[in-house]
Amino acid sequence: MDEEQARRIGRRLRSARLQRGLSLRVLADLADMSVGYLSMVENGRRLLDRSSYITALAEVLHIAPAELVGQPFAPADPHAGAAHEAIPALRLSLMGITMAAPPDRRPPQTPVSVLAERVARANGLYHAAEYGTLAAGLPSLLADLHAAAEAAVGPARHELLRLLADAYHPACTLLLKNLGYTDLAFIAVTRASDAIAELDDPVYSALSGFFHTHVLMSAGSPSQALAQATAAANTLEANLTTPDAHALLGELHLISATSATQDRQRPGNQREAEVRGHLAEAAKLAQRTGETRAWHLNFGPTNVGIHHVSLNTDLGRHSDAVRAERRVHPEILDQAPGRQAAFHADLGRSLAQIRGREADAVAAFLTAEEIAPQRIRANAPVRETVEYLLGRQLPARAARDLRGLAYRLGIQH
């Protein structure tokens, strides 16, 4: 054993543990190790050389493994890996199943209510940022819904077509926002449109437009995205017959505002005016609907407030974003940790641009990561901001936290 190396690692481990305010026993429990072993490591009598132990301790202490061992250490995120590993099966499912060519399987011998529960669970997994579990379960869910719809007639078929659309939509947003498979997301939203076309339901047609807008934004065409959202909103405004329709109209105003922030072809003043207009319309609708879970979304005053932060961040109005944060309580969306995490991430992005608030930005990113690690570790704007902060002067603790976050994001520095 290299005794000097063991002593150095022991000192680093003790320093990180004390900085976190953890006792040796608590750290041992959290990292699933024995107190005796950790005590010997801290005292330099055992060399910390097992990668699984190093990774576990770094995860608990929110630091990069290099902070313990003093050398580069390859990052690994098994959760993100699980989501990407599930993509080949999901790709085959999306490419092979259409309304014209249903899956070669018998319809599931379960009532529609059970299929509805599975669809609700898929949407819940998306909002909980459990992307690996969602991606793994989508192929069988989509195949079962297609087979059930093919065997049904009349109102029963229409109910299953609605469920099918509701299952394709989390597939679309998962593939777009979190995994980066824009082409597959387009297939998913097209399959949903095929099911919706048979319903001849203008509200569901507007819902299809909402998800098409997401795809167009991700593909780099915000002007087309805004046109799609506007057309969907116009269709919906003529059919505002239920509270759920009002909630969907609110979501269309929010995504229209997001599209406008990204359209660099428009003059800055025009973009800001359009964003403010859509936010104002969304706020009026939120006052009417209250907090909702319509369409497996999260429209309401809280989501409008979250968009005030994110949209001001995207417009470069960082002080306005930070001021808007004071009026938002994201914990209200307790069933949507992904939205909560996005709020803290966008707040962190603005704080990073305000002199003297860099440490607060790091804290916001850590909060976001704690709430929904898979969402934050796949977030490109967060990665870019973390890379920027790595070049800034930070207090020692914030700098250590930042290096740990950078490691978990896969940033080499």
Image: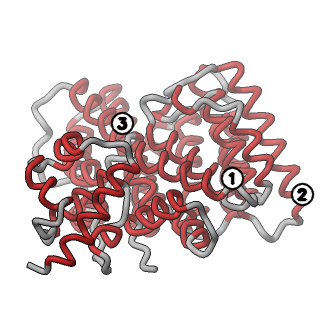
In the image, what residue occupies the spot 77% across and 60% down? 316
Give the CA distance from mark 3 to mark 2.
37 Å
Q: Tell which circle, 1 or 3, labels the residue nearer the N-terminal end.
A: 3
Is residue 137 left or right of 209 when viewed as pictured?
left
> Who is closer to the viewer here, 284 or 38?
38
Q: Neighbour class for label 3 at 10 Å: few (<14), some, many (≥20)?
A: some
Question: In what quadrant of the picture does the N terminus appear?
Answer: bottom left
Q: Position of residue 209 (x, y in %)?
A: 58, 48
In the image, what residue occupies the spot 58% across and 36% down? 202
In the image, what residue occupies the spot 56% across and 72% down? 390
In the image, what residue occupies the spot 65% across and 68% down? 221
Q: Tell which circle, 1 or 2, labels the residue nearer the N-terminal end.
A: 1
Q: Which mark is residue 258?
A: 1
> Who is closer to the viewer here, 154 or 93?
93
Is residue 78 left or right of 254 when viewed as pictured?
left
Q: Is residue 21 above or below residue 260?
A: above
Check disc 2 and give the amino acid type: Gln
**Label 3 sits on residue:** 124
Q: Neighbour class for label 1 at 10 Å: few (<14), some, many (≥20)?
A: many
Give the CA distance from mark 1 to mark 2.
14 Å
Check disc 3 and give the amino acid type: Gly
Q: Is residue 162 above or below residue 137?
A: above
Q: Position of residue 44 (x, y in %)?
A: 17, 66
Q: Is residue 363 above or below residue 182?
A: above
Q: Which mark is residue 1?
A: none
Q: Are marks 1 and 2 in contact (CB under 8 Å)?
A: no
Q: Position of residue 250 (x, y in %)?
A: 67, 34
Q: Neighbour class for label 2 at 10 Å: few (<14), some, many (≥20)?
A: few
Q: Tell which circle, 3 or 2, labels the residue nearer the N-terminal end.
A: 3
> Who is closer to the viewer here, 19 or 58?
19
